[in-house]
Image (cartoon, grey):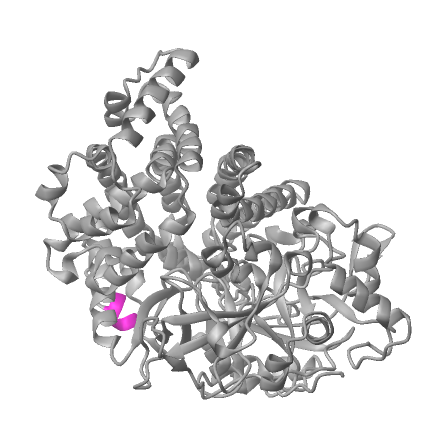
Amino acid sequence: MTARILLPIVPLAILCLHGPALAEEGMWMPQQIPEIQKQLVARGFRGDAKAFADLAGSPMGAVVSLGGCSASFVSPDGLIVTNQHCVTGALQYNATPERDLLVQGYVARTHEDELWAGPGSRASITVSMKDVTQEITGDLDPKLDDRKRYDAIERRSKERVKACEKDGMRCRVASFFEGNRYFEIAQLELHDIRLVYTPAEGIGNFGGEADNWRWPRHTGDFGFYRAYLGKDGKPAQHAKDNVPYHPKRWLKLDPQGAGPGDWIVVTGYPGFTRRHETYEEIRRMVEWSLPRSIERAEDQIALLEAVSKDDPDIRIKVANRVRGLNNGLTNNRGKLKGLVDAHLLEAKQARERALTTWIAADPARQREFGGVLEALDAIVAEENRTRLRDAVLDDVAGGSSLLSAARTVHRLSLERAKPDLDREPAYQERNWPRIRERQERLQKSLDLTADRVVFRYNLLEAASLPEGSRIAALDAAAGLQSRMGEADAARAIDEFLARLYAGTRLADADARLALLDKSTVELRGAKDSFIDLAVALYPDTEEAENRDKKNEGNRTRLAPTYMRALLGFSGGLLPPDANGTLRVTFGRVEGVAERDGILYLPQTTLAGVVEKCTGKGEFNAPQRQLEAIAALRAGHTTPYVDPKLLDVPVDFLASVDTTGGNSGSPALNDRGELVGLLFDGTFDTVASDIVFDPVRTRSILVDVRYMLWVMDEVDGVERLLAEMGIPPSS
């Protein structure tokens, strides 16, 4: 079986074959698009699909990654459009209780007013994708043990990245089709990103958590950045005298938008889907991972809301964290509900049984694929054996920003002593600036009261671990015992926390940053309580990390074989899972049957904003917006009214295949013009990340006409309209 990993590489043309669900299912690699051109045309697409294979051309050269969100250039002067929830980090970084930009939004009336998004903000443009499968795994010795196999793949990837990173490029080696293919991806990385404009929270997050992942939606989730360069025309860190970046490609906006039945194309950087995982992996998710994540998110949201309720400064500092927890909570609830209610777990099990029967029916298949499922299940069983302890250890290690900082400076000191190619990838020299940026930015979100509350929550979970799963170093440091009662454990933890927070200087930004340059000996002699705890926990985290690497090395041996079995069994009808790289997906603007007897229309309008507006809480539209709507109703004419709807459209549904990371992705018509921005999925079908529902899956997008109407007639941002070539209505 091992030798089969070294079979000739599966061609992309075979891997991208698809059947009836071609357009709706599949986050396609750009170079795959020419292979599906004919099928798209046959289904009514009238654009040039092949254009999406040209990374340097239009529209792909205009698509941007913000690291966790997608975006696009919309002017020759580096103006970037994305979602409002993708610029909240910049709002939070620049907000104060006296000027709460998270609520007010922001308008830069001049270039000089544009606000730096803060340390670590960046925009990346993919310029090349090169197949390096042969260089990464093509001649690996099949006799390597699992850990050495992992190390060999990691080493080769680091060598490729080092050779690739020249002239401002940032590179990575990414796995596709479960390790059957590897691509080296180069991106131009811009470091000076500034906030230009986003509407008030009452527009950009209208409906808040009540409407999150729901339809009908009336949210104006959009915002603008601008990218800057040094005066020498090269990527540079933020500086006052930097100049706007002039992209080679930018998108034109279509002020006519898109309507029911229209084709749209969404391009961007979807995070991760898990459609090819085994039944045992999905079962663990349904029975353990998702319920645990849901419970923890609910608890932490309650803690953070309680501690910030009466303190505007804390509320600003924890705002992004609370919003992220809420978003993940709703997403995970939807996934669990979809997997259980739709019996998708049973469907996955039945499919695996059919795959096993198919393999057993042919001697050649038995030789190639026999035993692969059992071997993958054995990895899951091994991971399950320590999953609770490993998860709690991770939660404790990341449960305090101060402990995370201590772990970072300690690990950096250990890795710095090694040759660069021997270092952990996250601690290679190429990442040292990013490490420093994260520690600089931390100061804007660090509140010791909130930090302590969440850390206490994680320590209490560690205190409840059963015998055999205890974290001995933590027990020793905090004075915990396995049979200690809840009250005694809580008392010991509170005393431990008092010592920790009194004995550290890591809350001071200058002191924290200075530690990044210290040796391990110097750190261990610093007599800092959080650093001492990080040092004590390091053997436990290192042991768990080594186990993970061993299991992953084994998985890189087995998963490609499993994927080829799935391809053979399915006749090649499997698109690649998302992995944070540039993708393209096709679909139409269309509604959906929510349930028997209920049909959701594909568009919402300003009428819904007025209907939902209560003047408080999550449905508090700004007064100036309500006045603009009233003027429209009184006879004011505007070019943004849809002649069929007789109103300004707000959001729309489309049958495109997207996931987290696609937030801010441009939606294009068949001429490559921007007609909307993707910002959400629907609650009942978020389980499509795991098992795709070709009938009901929809994404939610903000209509370009709503964006323009708000900019023009609510916030008066004529400067940006002119920059994008849109004449103001007045």
User: In the figure, residue 165 lies in which quadrant?
Assistant: bottom left
- Image coords of residue 705 (percent x, y): 72, 75
| Horizontal side, residue 396 vs residue 51: left or right | left
Report the residue at 41% width, 51% height from top: 444
Q: Look at the image and say whether residue 137 sits in the magenta stretch.
A: yes
> Is 198 in front, or is 66?
198
Report the residue at 43% width, 59% height from top: 563
Report the residue at 24% width, 58% height from top: 425
The residue range painted magenta reads: 133-138
Tally of numbered discs: 0
- Image coords of residue 58 (percent x, y): 52, 87
- Image coords of residue 594 (percent x, y): 78, 53
Depicted 729 relative to depicted 355: above or below: below
**What secondary structure prevails in the magenta region?**
helix
Report the residue at 56% width, 57% height from top: 101
Depicted 436 relative to depicted 673: above or below: above
User: In the figure, residue 638 lies in which quadrant?
Assistant: bottom right
As drawn, the residue found furthest toward the front would be 98
- Image coords of residue 472 (percent x, y): 25, 24
Residue 658 in view, yes or no: no
Residue 382 in view, yes or no: yes
> Is 279 in front, or is 308?
308
As drawn, the residue found furthest toward the right would be 634
